Image (cartoon, rainbow, N blue to C red):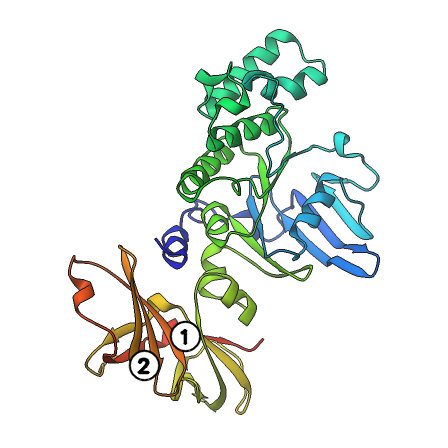
Amino acid sequence: MTSSQNIETSLSSNTATDSVPAWKQEGAEPFLRIENLTKKFGEFTAVDNISLDIYKNELFCLLGGSGSGKSTLLRMLAGFETPTSGRIIIDGTDMSGIQPWKRPVNMMFQSYALFPHLSVADNVAFGLKREGVGRAEVKQRVAQMLDMVQLGHLGKRKPHQLSGGQRQRVALARSLIKRPKLLLLDEPLGALDKKLREETQFELVNIQEELGVTFVVVTHDQEEAMTLATRIGVMNHGVIVQTDEPHDVYEYPNSRFVARFIGSVNLFAGFVVQDEPDAVHIESAEAGTTIVKHHGISCAPGQEVSVAVRPEKISISYERPTDADNILEGEIEDIAYMGSLSVFRVRLNSGKEVRVTQPNFDRHVGDRFTWNDKVFLSWKSDSTVVLTS
């Protein structure tokens, strides 16, 4: 499966709910409130005046590339870094000046940081023993937590006797056993191989839903964020540039950066030539035509914009379509068969390269198109996203 397909199939996994989510409720009180938070290292600003509300029982993902500031933000929440300015409020309490071990927070690190000389059970029990919890209660809570992460039969093993996925679950159990109000996870699945990571993502969601603990996850993996999150905060250069549910981040990016960063996208530069009551027309030399978008945007004639179209929204055909809003012409330059879908790179008459993905519904779909074929590309107006920034 490709990145765009994995994202597409997981968009709705965590957004369905029987009630209106807290972030859509007027007057709902956030569990975690970040107010104008800034962190500077000398002249470098790692986190730049971020304000963000996260609600109880959310699984919120901070998504960004290396150097975007996401890990620095997480470390400030944990108390490992002191903000240059701004406030962090957890469950109504200002965390300013409160030491990490006194916060209602626990953190799971990418490396897992398990004690190699301790058994699985003793690793999980470590925090409770340090707090002086009674032996019987420790034993009961460790057993319950190991059962929850499906490791009850491995309590006597040492970390080196476990697989990567099992070690990840031990670290998760150890982080959760002290019943934190907020769990911070820094690239929690980064050490796992792709297949195991995909399986563990769903396990993590199920555990979070069962416990009702608020999770804040830092990741650079867009698929992981889409699969896990109730909402995603996309970070770039120390700023959260978009906060939305996974479906909205993917289908309605608010900038060129977000459109490029989340999944695969085709971008066409152009300018508005006609702004009608029901549609806007965008002249694009890269597309070699005028692109139509039925309304829902605010722009003015002559304004420079970018048009974003996801590869799976584009149809490919030998005959010119009669029912499409936007039609381009080109030649197939490359084809990649990915099993469940095929990827086409089509060179337009303008010279612009366009990526198209098509699902393989039957076993011989790859025989339909081949290299150097002249084809038409088309998509509906509602698949067009117009970006002004």
- Give how far across and how far down residue 268 sits, in percent: 45, 80
- Residue for point 44% across, 69% down: 265
In the rendered view, does 346 fall on the left or right side of 117? Answer: left
**Looking at the rendering, in which quadrant would you find the C terminus?**
bottom right
> Are the residues flagged by discs 1 and 2 in contact, CB closer than 8 Å?
yes
In the rendered view, does 360 fall on the left or right side of 386? Answer: left
The number of discs equals 2
- Give how far across and how far down residue 82 sits, in percent: 80, 45
- Residue for point 54% across, 23% down: 159
- Residue for point 56% across, 16% down: 119
* Label 1 Cα crowd, 10 Å radius (few <14 / some 14-19 / many 20+): many
**Residue named by callout 2:** 325
Question: Visible in this render: residue 352?
Answer: yes
Q: Secondary structure at mark 1?
A: loop
Q: Which numbered tag is attached to residue 384?
A: 1
Pick whichever, 52 or 193, lies toward us: 193
Q: Amino acid at mark 2?
A: Asp
Q: Quadrant of residue 108?
A: top right
Question: Visible in this render: residue 276?
Answer: no
